[in-house]
Amino acid sequence: MPDQHQTTDEVIASALSLPAEERLSVLGAIHSSLADPSVDHGPEEPAAEVQAAWKDEIARRLEDVKRGRVATIPADEAERMIRGDAPPTL
């Protein structure tokens, strides 16, 4: 089976041939992948769908806090727990 990978120059040329809105989408996906390499914006999960899913998740979590379904803790306590300086509180 022949190698299907494009060279960097081919990828850049291809991206630059896209309309501005699509180039912005490519730029956003690349930026996200650099900020968090675990983010996968492959064809199965386009960046716009991921962003919409996070927006819904954030709204759900905020509603949980507003309705008292979850407990919050002060940021300094959370930082101590993350560092391992304090046990988790329940």
Image (cartoon, rainbow, N blue to C red):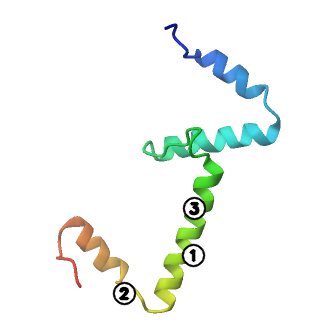
Callout 3: helix, strand or loop?
helix
Q: Amino acid at mark 1?
A: Ala
- Label 3 – label 2 distance at C-alpha: 23 Å
Q: Which residue is mark 1?
A: 59
In the current view of this chain or complex, which residue is farthest to the bottom?
A: 68
In the image, residue 13 above or below residue 68: above
Judged from the image, the secondary structure of the residue bearing numbered disc 2 is: loop
Q: Are marks 1 and 3 in contact (CB under 8 Å)?
A: no
| Mark 3 residue crowding within 10 angstroms, few (<14) / some (14–19) / many (20+) | few
Q: Residue at x 62, y 54 (%)?
A: 49
Question: For the residue marked with disc 3, what is the amino acid?
Answer: Ala
- Say which quarter of the image contains residue 88: bottom left
Give the distance between the C-alpha atoms of the residues marked 2 and 1, in whole angstroms: 16 Å
Where in the figure is residue 81, as x and y percent of width and height? Answer: 24, 72
User: Which circle, 3 or 2, is nearer the viewer?
Assistant: 3
Query: Of label 2 and label 1, which has the lower sequence position?
Result: 1
Residue found at the far top of this picture: 2
Which mark sits nearer the N-terminus, 3 or 2? 3
Position above or below: 51 against 61: above
Task: Tell me the amino acid under the disc marked 2.
Answer: Ala
Q: Residue visible at 69% across and 43% down?
A: 25
Q: Position of residue 40 (x, y in %)?
A: 50, 43
Residue drawn at x 82%, y 35% is 19
Q: Residues within 10 Å of mark 1 (few under 14, many from 20)?
A: few
Q: Nearer the viewer, residue 53 or 88?
A: 53
Which residue does the image show at 60% across and 57% down from the upper left? 51
Q: In which quadrant of the rendered image does the C terminus lie? A: bottom left
- For the residue labelled by badge 1, is the local secondary structure a helix, a strand or a loop? helix
Q: Is residue 84 left or right of residue 44?
A: left
Residue 53 is marked as 3
